[in-house]
Image: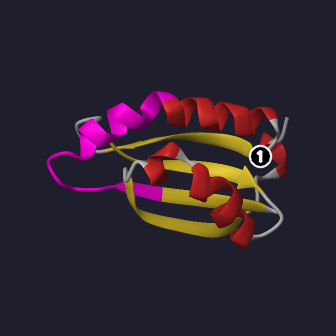
Amino acid sequence: MQFLITALDGKDSEALDRRMAARPAHIEYAKARAAEGKVIIGGAILDDNEKMIGSMLVVEYPSKEAVEKEYLANDPYVTGNVWQEIEVRPYRVAEIFKK
């Protein structure tokens, strides 16, 4: 089953610094999950000034609980306290966009 993860960074003055510190590990983590077929697509959410303020990912896991326990619990943006508001919703990529 596919899920849409929408995750917003903290809004404190250190939020961007935390993101940038965790970013290389987060990208490697997401690449590894993509190689396993678990991450379908993802990217940064930007504000009007193109500053990164969050992320979105579409992932494939058997359940929402699996997303939380297997993906989110180990993502460096979670363990590094970057993402402060995380929403996980069932999702389906439209057939026209599937490779």
**Residue drawn 79% across the image and 32% down it:** 35
Q: Quadrant of the image for the N terminus?
A: bottom right
Q: Find the magenta span and give its range.
A: 7-24
Please tell me whether residue 53 is drawn above or below residue 35 in the rendered image.
below
- Residue found 63% across the figure and 37% down from its top: 30
State the image coordinates of residue 48 (x, y, percent, origin top left).
Answer: 25, 42
Q: Amino acid at mark 1?
A: Lys
Quarter occupied by residue 69: bottom right
Give the residue drawn at x 59%, y 58%: 73
Q: In the image, is 5 to the left or to the right of 82?
A: right
Indicate whether residue 15 is drawn in magenta.
yes
Type of colouring: secondary structure
Location of residue 27 with respect to 73 vertically, above or below: above
Is 38 placed left or right of 44 in the picture?
right
Residue found at x 52% / y 68%: 87
Q: Position of residue 76 (x, y in %)?
A: 50, 44
Q: Please give the residue where the numbered disc 1 appears in the rendered image.
A: 38
Residue 37, position in %: x, y? Answer: 82, 41
Disc 1 crowd, CA 10 A, few/some/many (<14, 14-19, 20+):
some
Q: Is residue 34 left or right of residue 42?
A: right
